[in-house]
Amino acid sequence: MGEYIVEAKNLCKYFKVGKNQTLKAVDGVNIQMKKGETLGLVGESGCGKTTCGRTLVKLYEATSGTVLFERKDVSKLRGKELLAFRKDAQIIFQDPYASLDPRMTIGEIITEGMNVHFHMSEKEKEEKVNELLHKVGLNAEYANRFAHELSGGQRQRVGIARALAVEPKFIVCDEPISALDVSIQAQIVNLLMKLQREMGLTYLFISHDLSMVKHISDRVGVMYLGYMVELASNYALYDNPVHPYTQALISAIPEVEPDEEERKKRVHLEGEVPSPINPPAGCRFKSRCKYAKEICGQEMPELEEIEPGHYVACHMCGKESW
Amino acid sequence: MLVNHDVTEMMENIPDEMFKIVGIDKDAETPTRPRIGYWKDAWRRLRENKVAFAALIILLVLIFFIIFGPAISGYEFEQIDANAINQGPSAKHWFGTDDLGRDLFARVWQAGRVSIIIGILGAVIASVVGSIYGGIAAYFGGMVDDIMMRIVEVLLSIPYLIIVILISVITDSKSLGTMLVALTLTGWCGIARLVRGQMLQLKSQEYVLAANALGVTPIKIILKHMIPNTIGMIIVAITFDIPGYIFSEAFLSYVGLGIQPPSTSWGALASAAQQNFMFYPSQLLFPALMIALTMLSFTLLGDGLRDALDPKLRK
Amino acid sequence: MEKILEVENLNVSFNTYAGEVKAVRGVSFELSKGETLAFVGESGCGKTVTAKSILRLLNPPFAVIKPESKIICNGKDVLKMSEKELCEFRGDEVGMIFQDPMTSLNPTMTVGNQIMESLMIHKKLDKNAAREEAVQMLKMVNIPSPEKRINNYPHEMSGGMRQRVMIAIALACNPNVLIADEPTTALDVTIQAQIMDLMMEIKTEMNTAIILVTHDLGVVANFADRIQVMYAGEVVERGTTKEIFNESRHPYTWALLRSVPRLGSKSKEELYALGGTPPDLLLPLNHCPFADRCEFCMPVCKVHKPQETVLSDTHKVSCWLMHEKAPKVESFYDRRDK
């Protein structure tokens, strides 16, 4: 299975909270990504999707499980190899206001990574900054400006340029559009898709906006309380959602066409996401699931392939009619 | 709403060529607001703050006199004149003279040198030491942080009078140097805590995470991201600390633990004048006024700087 | 229908160091009983400022409502109210829900006390009666075991719960108008749907008029009766929800509708993205504010401001394309149907 660029096996990331309490942010997630594909990751806040993305690029150390990047175990990387990994795997953050240092000019922000990984003269750097700014659709004149002089969309472009500056292969896009306006969201998504076509990038696209995720991704994974409940190609997931949580998520998307909406039967979810601190045994969705049976309270369901490429973690799905 | 008749007419008289779709002009230079850098903007906001700006001007005037005052007076600050003892303010001696006939104008400014030097130097030394200490504690975190912060708490619990007395006993001198050592020995602890708090907050900022993801080394992250983003806060802390040091020095000199004659400071002047207070109140008035004015100005300036340097308050 | 709120020629400016930013420029609208009116637009288009001006929640001298503006609610001129009248007006006649339920609740008070506070002030209830009423309110917004929850502090509740409490507070005194400023933006999708359902339930039950401020076209499509699309501090198009979604005539409305990917659309195809950024409201603007970003821009658009063209009783558009001399353009709907 050497074709995968990123592979996470049974990835867990726990945080200690207070006395003897653990927050299981990510609990046994398996991810395999081919080169050049986009994997979407959706879920509600607190489901661990951001933690998962940050662990993949080694901003957090995994509590257990392994992350393989180009078949190398990321946790064992040291020195030169670690530096090479830092160059190949990049991340784009959600908040375009918090992710740029307010004391640095845009040019300085973009060159920061180049200084680490490449030996370039001042002139080469300047040229590269101009080229990158052009690539992300900004005027070269912005290089001398400060972040606070830019609008949200422009800042997010700078964030993308910073990641691209080190010529990465894999980028984690951590809710890159959530903080932006609708029209600007489309600009950024278009830019990300264009860059992927041109540079053959691999994306992990994290978002809670299901329609955008569907648009940009090849495959989509749905997370709930730290684990993956369903993983499938974007068409299969949206046309034929199997897990009750996925069904609820998709039907909760407010559709732009009012008429279509009236026809569609909504499956509204009762209750709220339970706390990820010391989660209950068994299926974590059981408290909100109307199909829950006894077995759901006892065993944690495993991700099973119900169709080629379509995985679901549910005791009830695909086994009997419900 | 009724449409104004003139407007309707104007609308109808628009020539046809005005209605040809040209679409978006890609090269159009979008007009932008004037660019304003961080420090320039902070300076602008400080200037708008009338109180803080007045405090700044008072401080500048005081500093001018502290530098040139003794020379302007035309007297040496230690020059004794037995013919002019305990005089009130006059054309000859602007602030009067003390019980040894020394010119108070010269002495007040000479004393100011000691007070201001202790104030500024003390605050700067404490801030530098405190920032480095707090920065290290915050960056490494965990055990290192725990141990370092416990040390700070122990140091803070020792009354500084004890330290001052101990140091003057050990070194057997009561000079400016020993006072500085004594005051800064625990003075940096407050700033260390402040910087640690700020740095801990910065550490989880997304731009620091981004630098981590780019593989930037810890030293460079501290130098390029953490310190520049704490510097505003440190400057404010320094301005708030200066009056504290000036007052501590005045207090120590007043109780006789500080600067010894013939060298003098505002506290020492006030202490000497206190004995004659009933008969010659003007001798106490001037040093006390200077202490009050300096402390007030620094505090008000610190207030203004805090508002001016806070990036959250930028409009 | 009975009109309860009338806003005419609302102008709001912000005084900044760089000059006067005209955030809202000549907005007029009316609201009838039991109706839901949505303000839609990008951030900075003045939708929140407009909503806040109705309650006079903007703080002078930084923000100024210009004297030519007129806000009439239930026959009373809001802009001429004294501080005391204003206090009675807020909460009693108009309630407001904010975007972030975390920062709009007082963290040091139990939610029960926060609901009771307004009941005791406005309805002059005594403590026990207010408490009973508060439990009723919590029950109405579907909070489970309200008798227990009433003693909770905001931090003990989840985001969705807090937003429910906010709604309970806003509705405590039976206001005629409820202003909801991005009520679901900070919430998760499944919770969003729950909150919107709740608001609609309450609306039909209490016949409250709602002003819904949002950038989410999906939310608007499902819950609003009428929509006004705002851009750069002006209303560029207004109409019923059907009119805006199915017959809109303004290029900016088209752009908004197009930039949202539909679940039925093909993936990975380029989304329609509006280029450029909204105009800087610091600079004078005497032409169509959308001209610089409009693909149908004509020379006239950069010189004169378009007048509002009346298409039907409810549907009005401010665009030069409506002028008789303007060419016919291929609308968003023609393109989509191809």
Image: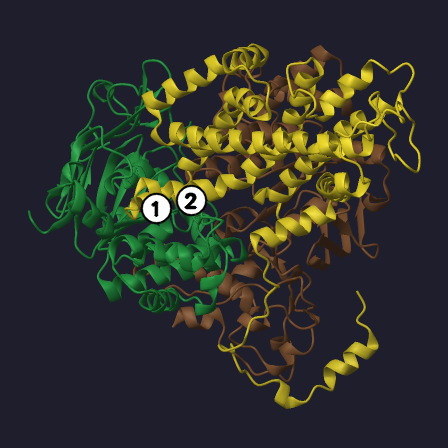
- State the residue position of label 2: B225
* Side of C67 where A54 appears, left or right: left
Q: Which mark is residue B211?
A: 1
* Side of B76 where C42 appears, left or right: left
Disc nearer the start of the sequence (1/2): 1
Chain containing mark 2 = B
Kindly indicate whether the residues beneath marks 1 and 2 are on one polypeptide chain: yes
Residue B51: x percent and y percent?
Answer: 77, 40
- Badge 2 density bin: few <14, some 14–19, many ≥20, Cα 10 Å: many
In-front residue for pair A84/C323: A84
Q: Mark 2 belongs to which amino acid?
A: His
Chain that is brown in the image = C
Image quarter in which the N terminus of chain B is found: bottom right
Q: Based on the displayed image, in which of its 4 quarters is residue B11 positioned? A: bottom right
Toward the front, the furthest residue is B82
In the image, what residue occupies the spot 49% across and 49% down? Answer: A102
Under circle 1, the secondary element is: helix
In the image, what residue occupies the spot 50% across and 42% down? Answer: C185
Q: Based on the displayed image, in which of its 4 quarters is residue B209 positioned? A: top left
Q: Are marks 1 and 2 in contact (CB under 8 Å)?
A: yes
- Badge 1 density bin: few <14, some 14–19, many ≥20, Cα 10 Å: many
Of circles 1 and 2, the one toward us is 2
In the image, what residue occupies the spot 39% across and 65% down? Answer: A133
Chain that is green in the image = A
Depicted C283 relative to depicted B172: above or below: below
Chain that is yellow in the image = B
